[in-house]
Image (spheres, rainbow, N blue to C red):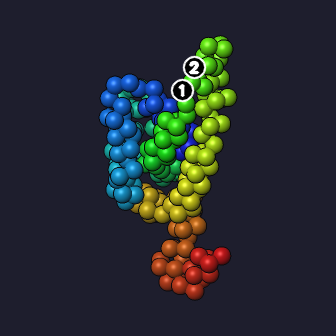
């Protein structure tokens, strides 16, 4: 949740500063949101595959072959891989909300702060970020709800494994109710 919002704010600030091809950058960063979770899961499974994955091949080509990891088969890295793929998919959505908030901030405030000697970081910390409080609240809530509903990426990428490392509540309800055919227990889990 926090990582999604940090990336989204960074992207929004970056896109807001761009003067040429602004719509192109908005579209490029928003594009992953349009991809379904199943397709995104398959794409990231191919990227992170241990034997023929793009990431491990690139690491091997640049001389980092000693650091090649089974991203989806190692319990230490599987959840991290799902988190990063989910951040990649959803940060563009929150970026649009933050971008709308950034465009609602009067430029006069930043100009006055710059005249008073405030650098970019101080302007962001004392002016921009506090004025984005409403957008931050909305995005944090939406991100938390999305994280609690996360199912399709886990079903495609790791099937809840290795072991139980990437199981979420939604996936456990599905696995118990439909995989183990214990609908009563699955319903009780979903209700609680």
Residue 60, given in percent of the width and then of the height, sits at 39, 32
Q: Nearer the viewer, residue 106 or 42?
A: 106
Relative horizontal placement of residue 171, taking residue 125 as reference (left or right): left
Disc 2 is placed on an element classified as helix
Determine whether, in the image, residue 134 is placed left or right of residue 98: right
Where is residue 50? Give x, y as percent: 40, 46
Question: For this view, does 151 lie left or right of residue 186?
Answer: left
Residue 145 to residue 182: above or below:
above
Residue furthest to the bottom in view is 184
Say which residue appears at 43% left-offset and 62% top-offset: 152
Q: Position of residue 151 (x, y in %)?
A: 48, 63
Q: Residues within 10 Å of mark 2 (few under 14, many from 20)?
A: few
Figure quadrant of residue 153? bottom left
> What residue did someone put label 2 on?
111
Neighbourhood count class around disc 1 (C-alpha, 10 Å): few under 14, some 14–19, many 20 upward = few
Q: Which residue is mark 1?
A: 107
Measuring 54% from the left and 68% from the top, which residue is drawn there?
170
Q: How many marks?
A: 2
């Amino acid at each position: 949740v926090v990582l999604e919002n940090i990336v989204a704010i960074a992207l929004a600030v970056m896109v807001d500063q761009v003067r040429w091809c602004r719509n192109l950058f908005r579209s490029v960063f928003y594009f992953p949101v349009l991809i379904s979770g199943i397709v995104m899961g398959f794409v990231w499974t191919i990227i992170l595959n241990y034997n023929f994955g793009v990431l491990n091949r690139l690491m091997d080509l640049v001389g980092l072959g000693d650091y090649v990891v089974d991203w989806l088969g190692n319990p230490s890295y599987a959840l991290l891989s799902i988190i990063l793929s989910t951040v990649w998919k959803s940060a563009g959505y929150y970026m649009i909300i933050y971008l709308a908030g950034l465009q609602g901030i009067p430029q006069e405030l930043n100009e006055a702060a710059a005249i008073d000697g405030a650098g970019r970081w101080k302007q962001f910390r004392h002016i921009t970020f506090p004025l984005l409080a409403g957008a931050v609240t909305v995005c944090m809530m939406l991100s938390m709800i999305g994280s609690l509903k996360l199912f399709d990426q886990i079903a495609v990428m790791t099937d809840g494994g290795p072991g139980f490392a990437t199981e979420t509540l939604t996936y456990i309800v599905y696995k118990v109710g439909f995989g183990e055919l214990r609908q009563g227990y699955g319903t009780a889990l979903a209700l609680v």
